[in-house]
Image (tube, helix red, strand yellow):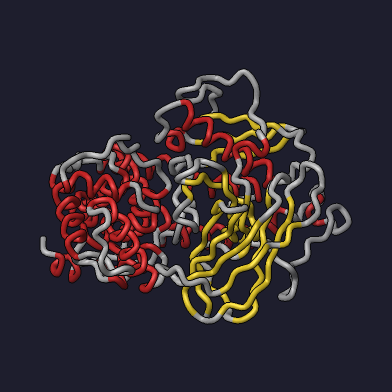
Amino acid sequence: MPESDMTGSFSESRDDWLPQLYQERWDAFVRLATLLLADQQVAEDAVIAAFATSYLRDPKLHSYEHAVSYVRTAVVNKARSRQPAERDATPPETPEDLAYWCLRGLLARQREVLVLKLATPDLSDDDIAETLGMSVSAVRNNETKGLIAIGERLRPGSQTNPGHADPRVEAVVRSALETFAESIHPMSRYDAIISQIARRPHRGRPTTWVIVLACGLAFLVGVLLPLLGSGNGSTMGDPEALPSIRTPESNSQSLSTLQTDLDVFYLGRDDGLIHRELRDLPTSGDRLGTAVGAVLNVAPLDPNYTSGWAAGQVNRATVKGNRITLDLSASAFSQFKNGEQVQRAIQQLVVTATAAVGDRTGDKSVRILVDGSPNLPIIGKPATDFVDEGFARCARVRVDSPQAGADMSAGTITISGVAQPTVSVMSYEVRPPQSSRIITSGQINLSANDGDKWRPWHATFTMPKGEYDLIIREGTHIADEKVITAK
């Protein structure tokens, strides 16, 4: 069915748009995810999770184009949270194969921009910016950066116009993506989408019958409760028998629906180390459950980070004494392929869980279950609970402010974070994208070394309006890099 016909017949009901988008877009979404991940099986799992998550959230989708855009963004986010297939150590010889091999080695945001730009020609730069959650200028900057990097490998020493991409390189990359896309033949997986939806609780707008039933029950409770409490033998009619219940006044503090400054830990795509983001997220019961759920289902702000876990459900997250128990759905473990992946992901989860409950002494351990069973995929039943392994698996420097993609007020700004106790010399640079020109730079102030504790650091400087790369260095080594915008 042509897209124009689908647009005219679009229904906002998720029970209508789900099969509609599956029929029209499943193959395209799987090809998109496969180009990003270079693994069709993992890609299909990512698209299944994207459809299921979109259905369960039940957003207000006002048009067919809006629905396609919403699910496409979910597909990219789910692909970003999965581990791409490893590249061969030896580069291929044919130009197209080498171009795709080089593309797979780019920074995540460059790779995503190029795949969306060159393999999905109906998308504008505005569409790509919306999908990736970045500005249009950032899309164009990352496109140029990615093509220049690939061109330097394809045609070493041939760069005649620094800062600009060779159109011949773009043609080779586009051809490589088209060739690879033609080799992808998605399997029919609609039953897997429905199965994943059925395993997870439905969220979103309640259906009409639920609202009617709730109103009816409220009415019956309001009518029958006084009658049931009026008997002589009942304590419900005795005002002294129970504590009084007072309706909160309009200015009373209500239960928060947002967990603020939540420590959520991710893995670096390149280094595999644990990095931290401070997030404000809708609450899922308590701080522990919200943080663990974020590791499983919330994409990092920084495209250079990823989660070791697949989309999944937190069945239970509890603390008793010094033991934290996390019972996760089997779907959360679906992307593991070897023991090293499992160990990295478990340490990511352990650090997140212990940070959420405030484990200052390091005494807490974490027990992980899969749908109630202690037998974990690949590694089996652990002999002991898991514990935070300390600095060894963590990035040496953490940037807490600004977060990746942040919009800041131009003028005087302060950057801050923490560093491991062995870090002694730090500096910063602020540069326009794709430029070696330094807007500002300087040394970073580190707090006094306090034993084996993380050392806070900060720096203050003036930054004019514009989009910039903020580069944090430890000595001469780039410790982290954030794209930020000053307005």
Q: Nearer the viewer, residue 311 or 267?
A: 267
How many circles with numbers are drawn on the protein? 0
Residue depicted at 70% across the width and 63% down the height: 458
In the drawing, does residue 5 fall left or right of residue 135?
left
The quadrant in which residue 143 appears is bottom left
Residue depicted at 54% across the width and 69% down the height: 430
Q: Is residue 419 visible?
A: yes
Q: Nearer the viewer, residue 311 or 109?
A: 109
The quadrant in which residue 118 appears is bottom left
Residue depicted at 73% across the width and 46% down the height: 421
Q: Is residue 290 visible?
A: no
Q: Position of residue 477 (x, y in %)?
A: 56, 51
- Extreme residue in the front direction: 157
Q: Position of residue 151 (x, y in %)?
A: 26, 56
Vertical relation: 244 (above or below) 305: below
Residue depicted at 55% across the width and 57% down the height: 217
Q: Position of residue 201 (x, y in %)?
A: 46, 46
Quadrant, the N terminus: bottom left
Q: Nearer the viewer, residue 260 or 234?
A: 260
In the drawing, does residue 395 fall left or right of residue 434?
right
Vertical relation: 324 (above or below) 464: above
Q: Position of residue 311 (x, y in %)?
A: 44, 44
- Extreme residue in the left direction: 1
Q: Nearer the viewer, residue 318 or 396?
A: 396
